[in-house]
């Protein structure tokens, strides 16, 4: 299971009981992958 920080958008794995972003310290994380729109060029 991976978590995405809603503050910095980094992906964090292997989170233990206390869920917190190790990068920015935000406690607000969402499960799974965020729906990030990618720029796709199709001719
Ligand atoms: Zn963060």
Image (spheres, rainbow, N blue to C red):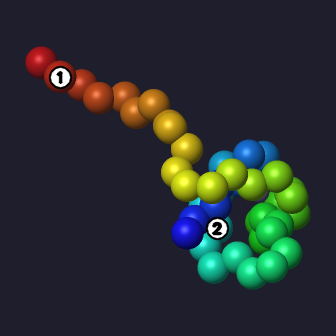
Q: Which residue is mark 2?
A: 12
Mark 1 to mark 2: distance in Å? Answer: 32 Å
Task: Name which residue lies at 37% across and 29% down.
Answer: 39
What kind of element bears circle 1?
loop
Picture coordinates of residue 18 (x, y %)? 85, 75
Tell which circle, 1 or 2, labels the residue nearer the N-terminal end: 2
Count of numbered marks? 2
- Choose top left, top right, bottom left or bottom right for residue 32: bottom right
Q: Is residue 4 left or right of residue 28?
A: left
Query: Where in the image, quadrant-wise, is ligand 1 located?
Result: bottom right
Q: Is residue 25 above or below residue 16?
A: above
Task: Name which residue lies at 50% across and 38% down.
Answer: 35
Within 8 Å of ligand 1, the CB of disc 1?
no
Image quarter hosting the C terminus: top left
Picture coordinates of residue 11 (x, y %)? 60, 61
Mark 2 Cα-neighbour bin, 10 Å: few <14, some 14–19, many ≥20: some
Within 8 Å of ligand 1, the CB of disc 2?
yes
Image quarter hosting the N terminus: bottom right
What kind of element bears circle 2?
strand
Q: Is residue 37 left or right of residue 21?
A: left
Task: Name which residue lies at 86% across and 58% down.
Answer: 27
Q: Is residue 12 left or right of residue 36?
A: right
CB within 8 Å, label 1 to label 2:
no
Mark 1 Cα-neighbour bin, 10 Å: few <14, some 14–19, many ≥20: few
Disc 1 versus disc 2: nearer the observer: 2
Q: Nearer the viewer, residue 41 or 25?
A: 25
Q: Is residue 18 above or below residue 24?
A: below
Picture coordinates of residue 20 (x, y %)? 82, 67
Residue 42 badge: 1
Task: Name which residue lies at 57% across and 65% down.
Answer: 2
């Amino acid at each position: 299971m991976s978590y995405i920080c809603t503050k910095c958008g980094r992906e964090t794995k292997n989170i233990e009981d206390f869920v917190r972003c190790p990068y920015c310290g935000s406690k607000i994380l969402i499960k799974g992958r965020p729906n990030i729109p990618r720029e796709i060029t199709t001719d």
